[in-house]
Image (cartoon, rainbow, N blue to C red):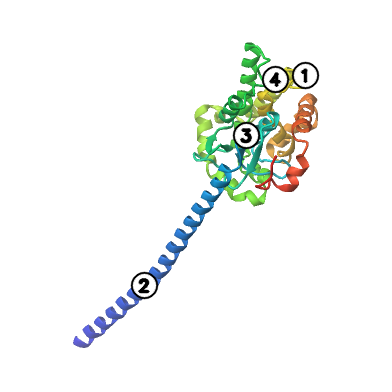
Amino acid sequence: MIGVAQVASNQSKRNISRWVERLSTEGKFQTGAIVIAVAAMILDLIRRRQRRLEWANAGRDVVILHGIGRGLYIPSASPYVMKLATYLRMANIEHKMDITEPLGPTGKSPWITINGQSMEDSQVIMDFLGSHFNKDFSSHLNDEQKAVAWLFAVMVEEHLARHRRWIRDGHQLGLMDIGLCRYLLSWSAAMRMSWKQELMMAQGIGRHAHPEIESFPRRNFRALSNYLGNKPFLMGDEPCEVDCSLFGWLVQIKYNYPGSRYGTLLKQVMVLYDYPNLGAYVTRMKELFWPDWDDCLSQHFINDEID
């Protein structure tokens, strides 16, 4: 019995020794991982600080537009970035594009920094810049026309967009719009897709059958086309703020959606020319405010590019 006990004791000692050695080894790996993680965090903080110093020193009233970079066929894969960038061009406001931090402090894109201050939400930004630079492209509209313009902007951004882009084709469009180099950003957005689906279910759009959902954009395009008519811009002979919203979305549909399920549906609108005035409208806005379109695509919105 003594021999058996001695053997058991020795075995226990060996087990304890191996456990201590393993713990020590794993501890080294854990310590190394922690050191690397801390170093990466410090490096990121340094780079973020450097970027903010650069943005602050960009010049008085120079807008730094932060957002998602170019898609495969368009200067930005985000309709909201295109909306705001078009407004900056319409208002002739000096700005620079930054894609190093596409998401703002609360996770929204686009966002801007100007004179050391940051601001999020494309519409809030446009309202601020309009007041700051005394730019009001809707001043010639009467109250009724301003109400119509606002309702069309809300329709485009809240109804036309959400039920297709974010629910039905979100994963596919993310990869098509942004390209492989932006896959991780698209994957992050896709991870939030289930939450958006739940939101749309609660809102009601997600509860409709597929044919009913597909009927919504048709009605929206019909309304847009009928109101646009033969006018060069939505509200008349001069472009205004609502045209930035409308162009931001229609240009995505024309250039980024082909091949997706939404694009297949919209062939009846943009390719088969059921509403040719909408296609002509996109071309007109592009030629007027984006004469450097091809340059933007070739340069991939390089960080130090002045638009």
Secondary structure of the residue carrying numbered label 1 = loop
Amino acid type at image mark 4: Ala
Q: Which image quadrant is residue 109 in?
A: top right
* Front: mark 4 or 3: 3
Q: Quadrant of the C terminus?
A: top right
Q: Quadrant of the N terminus?
A: bottom left
Q: Is residue 102 visible?
A: no
Secondary structure of the residue carrying numbered label 2 = helix
Confirm or deny contact between disc 4 and disc 3 (CB under 8 A).
no
Residue 159 screen position, x and y as percent: 60, 27
Confirm or deny contact between disc 3 and disc 2 (CB under 8 A).
no
Separation of residues labelled 3 and 2 (CA atoms): 52 Å
Q: Residue at x 25, y 81 (%)?
A: 8
Separation of residues labelled 1 and 4 (CA atoms): 14 Å
Of the two numbered discs 2 and 4 on the same chain, state the one appearing first in sequence: 2
Residue linked to disc 4? 223
